[in-house]
Amino acid sequence: MNLKVAIQMDPIENIDIAGDTSFRIALEAQERGHELFYYTPDKLAYAEGEITARGWPLTVRRELGNHFTLGAEQTVKLADWDVVWVRQDPPFDMGYITNTHLLDMLKPDCLVVNDPFWIRNYPEKLLVLKFPDLTPPTTIARDIQTLRAFKEKHGDIIIKPLYGNGGAGVFKLSRDDKNLSSLHELFTGINNEPLIAQQYLPDVVAGDKRVILVDGVAVGAINRVPAKGEVRSNMHVGGRPEPVDMTERDLEICARIGPILREKGQIFVGIDIIGKYLTEINLTSPTGIQELERFNGVNTAALIWEAIEGRLA
């Protein structure tokens, strides 16, 4: 099966080919004989009844400093392509949301991965709310009184922007910390979005586990250990990836959430587990497949493409 594949992603010249998941997905597609087209999110458009993208034919290679070649710039009708990948990073702002609306109009002419309707309706920190028995105590609020009451009840908490990513804006507040009001003023002065607060999980010092699911089935996990002096385990901010086995609790969590992910067209998902708790379900631009492949030999990119090819067969 030879597919025409368009990839909507952030600038390809800036990626780290040793760890970037979008690069690994593109490389696997190319090795399977699929044709690649690349464009950045700002080049997506609605034009007189058609969803178009202005971008470039793409060739990738695992060669540091020379990892891609672009063909001549052109504007294409995305309905003519078999697969469109949504691989842009958050923030999950109105630009991102608008793009999901535009991409949603491509159905059923092509397969958009992950399904943009559910990316929009199930962003990372909201889908977990459907599973309160799997998650730590959580509140989502803009109201300072609600946040104060939550902190008073639970003591040490983590507070962060609801639609942030990569560990940006994540703060740990201890029971005696007096900075909640100041942080609230800072965040609410930036935008109109609520904040999310969760009870702090001491198990995070041993790592934040990223579990990869393909078409609703867990295929493996990596552990991300915070750097010394850090509460955040994200690799963007110095978290160290390590090999890790999946526990019975991990598999229980995956068994609970896997069917809804498959049903909603979420082919490639990364979930975060700290200790025994599910903390996030990442649909927008999950990462970690290159680390997983290095640690245990699981070619997640191949499994993802097998799932896509199976849906299109």
Image (cartoon, rainbow, N blue to C red):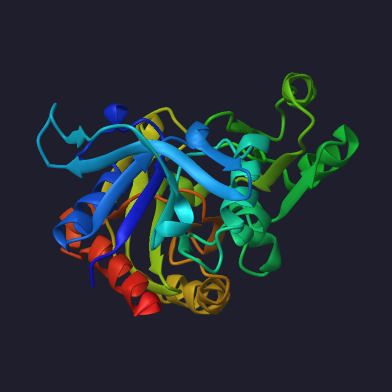
- Of residue 105 and residue 214, the one placed in the foreground of this image is 105
Q: Name the spot of residue 233 as percent of width and height, x first.
A: 42, 40
* In this view, 123 is above or below 47: below
Q: Name the spot of residue 101 as percent of width and height, x first.
A: 65, 50
- Of residue 157 and residue 43, the one placed in the foreground of this image is 43
Say which residue appears at 35% left-offset and 73% top-offset: 307
Give the position of the C terminus as an image quadrant.
bottom left
Q: Quadrant of residue 121?
A: bottom right
Say which residue appears at 59% left-offset and 41% top-offset: 47
Q: Name the spot of residue 286 as percent of width and height, x first.
A: 43, 51
Number of numbered discs visible in the structure rendering: 0
Residue 51 shows up from this direction = yes
* 307 horizontally vs 198: left or right: left
Say which residue appears at 87% left-offset and 41% top-offset: 146
Say which residue appears at 78% left-offset and 25% top-offset: 188
Of all residues shown, which one is farthest toward the front? 48
